[in-house]
Image (cartoon, rainbow, N blue to C red):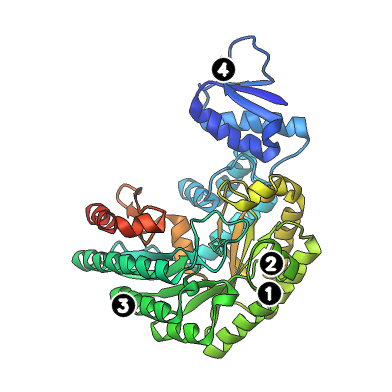
Amino acid sequence: MYSIAVEDEKSCYRLSELARMFLRPEEFSIAIGDCDSDAAYDLRIASRMDALRQAQILYDFLSAETGRSLEWGVLTGVRPVKLLQELVAAASATEAVRILTEEYRVSENKISLLMDVYRTQADVVYQPSPPSVGLYIGIPFCPSRCQYCSFPSNVYTQQGAERYLDALYKEMEAVHAILRGRGWNAESIYIGGGTPTSLSSEQFDDLLAHVSRAFLSQDTREFTVECGRPDTIDPFKLDAILKHGGRRISINPQSMKDETLVAIGRSHSAADIGKAFEFAASAGIRDINADLIAGLPGESLSDFEESLERVLAFEPSNITVHTLAVKRASRLIEEDRDVSFRQADTASQMVALARKRLCSDGYRPYYLYRQKHMAGNMENVGYAKPGAESLYNIRIMAEDQSIIALGAGGITKMYYPAENRLERIPNVTNYEIYTERIDEMIRRKEAGII
Ligand code: SF4
């Protein structure tokens, strides 16, 4: 048990995050104490140092004690690509690499991944013009709840969805009026969740009709619908997507192993995944993303490799490789508190294997983000065939465009380029409360979207 003293609450929180990447929660305590006293702490970190220096001291101490180093070094943030972009803009790529290596302790391997993402983005992205926004529309329903889910998703019911959609249409109408008043257009539209295709065929068709009427214009460059669960996808819904202007979808296998799919609470089989890809191919949808998760409970490296090969055989234009993140809101953490630690090494091997295999097959990494509690402290990486990169995914990570989020749990982020500042306008997360308080959600947007 390591006992570490810091002098203020902020450092305590930040440094605990870093310590958790080396140690299980029961193996350390970080408390507020007097760093100049003689009390028996294993390490004292004074507040007079800046945050980076404090993190370096803790990192070097734990690295020496455990004999381990972390691939992401002292970085605990969600957006390492953004940090790289800022470092390059402030000096040069060479200096950015030096700072990441020496000051942030990032491994050569992860720096090369960051550089690959950075180069792909530099190839495909231009600066957004201020009048354009990204639009996110959330449908918080799924056919069942995955064991690792930490989203505010609900099991679909016809009436619940009916009430929710009525409120959502009200919010859409208000946002449409706000955008029209400002002369802004949606550059990208993303319908996510949850699983939007959990809706009944009529509800789904109606939703798309509303979205397309309110927001689709000749300036819209991308319209994505997350289909997610293969068992919610059928030819009618795919035709509806195309009819209303959608062009990109995602079908998310997570794993192609039937035992794993049962264990994680998915209500479909690997065969259903194959069927969903066949439906999409027959409908003529070419831009498909497939999500896989590295580090799922009970999965070995060869299980993951087999899933990856089977997914590659479907020839999706995008594959996103997530690392299992077991958060407090998931059922998995109650059942298996230790899974992230147990799967840490395997998850890192899976992530490395995916990168090698996908790059050899012509995919390029184009967006990357990290979350708390990820097995092996890895990352989530979106890979795409050249030209198939999702603009929405890049923008949301870059935080250089306003993203207006509709629906329960949606957090609008207004971007002000002159000050390089973001302002958040949150909607409530619970869908029933959202429905009841829809007028208030609208008022928040009317006041905040400026
Ligand atoms: S499909 Fe996604 S949102 Fe739905 S329950 Fe599973 S993890 Fe949660």
Reading the image, the residue beneath label 2 is 261
Which quarter of the image is occupied by the N terminus? top right
Looking at the rendered structure, the secondary structure element under dot 1 is loop
* Kind of residue at badge 3: Ser
Reading the image, the residue beneath label 3 is 217
Along the line of sight, which residue is nearer the eye, 179 or 361?
Answer: 179
Reading the image, the residue beneath label 4 is 33
Measure how far apart labels 4 and 3 are at the Cα level: 58 Å
Pointer 3 or 1: first along the chain: 3
Looking at the rendered image, the disc whose residue lies closer to the viewer, 3 or 1, is 1
**On screen, 171 above or below 15?**
below
Looking at the rendered image, the disc whose residue lies closer to the viewer, 3 or 2, is 2
Q: Is mark 3 within 8 Å of ligand 1?
A: no
Measure how far apart labels 1 and 2 are at the Cα level: 7 Å
Looking at the rendered image, the disc whose residue lies closer to the viewer, 4 or 1, is 1
Task: Please state if 77 lies on the left or on the right of 341 as rendered.
Answer: left
Q: Residue at x 54, y 34 (%)?
A: 14
**On screen, 325 above or below 206?**
above
Residue 117 at x, y = what percent? 57, 60
CB atoms of marks 1 and 2 within 8 Å: yes
Residue 390 at x, y = what percent? 49, 69
**How packed is label 4: few (under 14 Cα within 10 Å), some, or many (20 or more)?**
some
**How packed is label 1: few (under 14 Cα within 10 Å), some, or many (20 or more)?**
some
Reading the image, the residue beneath label 1 is 269
Q: Farthest top residue?
A: 38
Q: Farthest left residue?
A: 181
Pointer 4 or 1: first along the chain: 4
Looking at the rendered structure, the secondary structure element under dot 3 is loop
Q: Is mark 2 within 8 Å of ligand 1?
A: no
* Kind of residue at badge 4: Gly
CB atoms of marks 4 and 3 within 8 Å: no
